[in-house]
Image: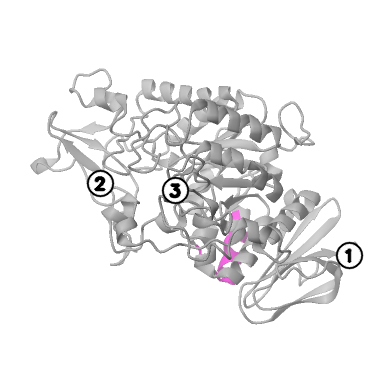
Amino acid sequence: MTVPADADGAVDGVPWWRRGVVYQVYPRSFLDTNGDGVGDLPGIAAKLGHLRALGADAVWISPFYPSPMRDFGYDVTDHRGVDPLFGTPGDFDRLLAEAHALGIRVILDYVPNHTSDLHPWFAESRASRDNPKRDWYVWRDPGPGGGPPNNWLSTFGGSAWTLDEATGQYYLHTFLVEQPDLNWRNPAVEAEMLEVMRFWLDRGVDGLRVDAVQNVIKDERFRDNPPNPDFREGDDPFNRLLRVWSGDRPEVHGVIARMRRVVDAYDGDRVLIGEVYNTVERVLPYYGDDGAGCHFPYNFQLIVLPWKAREIDAAIRRYESLLPPGAWPNWVLGNHDRSRIASRVGRAQARVAAMLLLTLRGTPTIYYGDEIGMTDVPIPPERVQDPFEKNVPGMGLGRDPERTPMQWSGAPNAGFTPGTPWLPVAADYRETNVETQRCDPESMLALHRRLIALRRAEPALSLGSWTPVDAGGDVLAYLREHEGTRFLVALNLGPEPASLPFDGSGEVVLSTDIDPKDIPVRDRVELRGNEAVVVRLSPSIKPSAGMGG
């Protein structure tokens, strides 16, 4: 069943991505169909029914391009191909067609900042200083004394510069040594990478999530980054310097504007999403002006903030107040780079977090497995795969724990693979899996399905306005309204019972405790510990001093 849409992909004139829910799949860990222990594209296609039953409107698929897998696909050797590990181009086309037949849009990861050091372009670039592709990457002469050109650091530890002894120059790699940065100041590089976007859009994909977009332009004078005054021993060493000159330069917004023009040239309401880890003030300019920026840059506040009601409340208010006119918010609880929400806040609060994610104003993204409450999995030293952990050991920076196989059933290896999984499966997979939760009306999966169904049925929860409600202690609350229909969302971020007074009456239509519907409330919402509720307010309710801080 497809979603009725206008010719441009909008429903009732509203872009699908404003109404919709995005689901992220990490292909290596979703479903393995050939027994090699690594998930693949046919595996994603086989589980599209799960996404449809969940209520997802789009699937964002992390990279599956040809790669030596030093960074598991983010080190690309062919931006237009499919790595045999994941299948064939035909497998991708079938996945795309089957997703569209189910009304599920497909968003791909687009990796513009760098390639693999095994990419044919880099092989040419490093061949000699006068090679025609030399300037396709960022090369610099050694600094004084023969060392790196400046003090820039790699995200994955150590200097961001590596000396190529054959040519006597250093090349820049914001990430791994094996991931040299492309030179987006070279018009030929930009032209080629924009053609990569067109290749996938021509093939029919519905959008692109742009990886590390703030890094594609660097300071043309290559100045040293200043020290970070807030750095403390024990922090990630990458944060020792403020990244003033190595990324987030003003010229990046011109690049994004040209990316946006590529996307906007296609019908079907295609979407451009930017990955930008930065302060709110620095992230918001990536929306751009007059449609020149991303449709939205990802907002990671719920991943990085302490799980405290007052801090989250203040952050939401601030984000909403700073959004440029016409900009659409978005929220994320987890992804392939950060610890899972159930491990960060506990299983009980993960249910509250799900209600927060799916009732705030803006587009929510669900990371695979969060819908069943998957947690981080301890990785024995001999099973570590992530280069981040290998380069900066002992600091808990490795990303393997949140990338473990999807838990489909109580079968061996959680039904993920008939072979040996590339990462260990969680010890609790027999209890925490899709098959078990599918038939349990009180499960995490059931809660997600109900929340998404309610969001889909009620425009107030998908498109409506957002108004904060004053609350105290561990309670976070807000109103959502659309065309006279109003909901009060009240969330208890603590383990002790709490209450929220309000003027008027209504009925609880959904609780994280999965109570029966239509529970009447008047003048006060009583919350058990670790409980969140959605209250449909009676039409007579008007804003008051207690509602709408």
What span is in magenta?
305-319
Q: Which mark is residue 419?
A: 3
Local crowd size for mark 3, using a 10 Å CA cut-off: few (<14), some (14–19), many (≥20) = some
Q: Is residue 147 magenta?
A: no
Label 1 vs label 2: CA separation?
A: 59 Å
Q: Residue type at mark 2: give it.
A: Asp
Element carrying mark 3: loop
> Residue at the spot x=78%, y=34% of the render?
4
Element carrying mark 1: loop
- Residue 294 lies in what quarter of the image? top right
Decide which of 288, 527 is in the foreground and name it. Answer: 527
Label 3 vs label 2: CA separation?
A: 49 Å
Local crowd size for mark 2, using a 10 Å CA cut-off: few (<14), some (14–19), many (≥20) = some
The residue to which callout 1 is attached is: 538
Can you tell which of label 3 and label 2 is closer to the viewer? 3
Q: Is residue 219 left or right of residue 528?
A: left
Image height of 450 relative to 58, above or below: below
Q: Residue type at mark 1: give it.
A: Ser
Label 3 vs label 1: CA separation?
A: 55 Å
> Mark 3 and 1 residues: CB-CB less than 8 Å, in contact?
no
The residue to which callout 2 is attached is: 224
Image height of 344 relative to 170, above or below: below
The quadrant in which the C terminus is found is bottom right
- Reading the chain from its start, which is encountered first: label 3 or label 1? 3
Q: Where does the image place residue 127, in percent across and percent down from the top left? A: 19, 23
Q: Where does the image place residue 329, in percent across and percent down from the top left? A: 62, 49
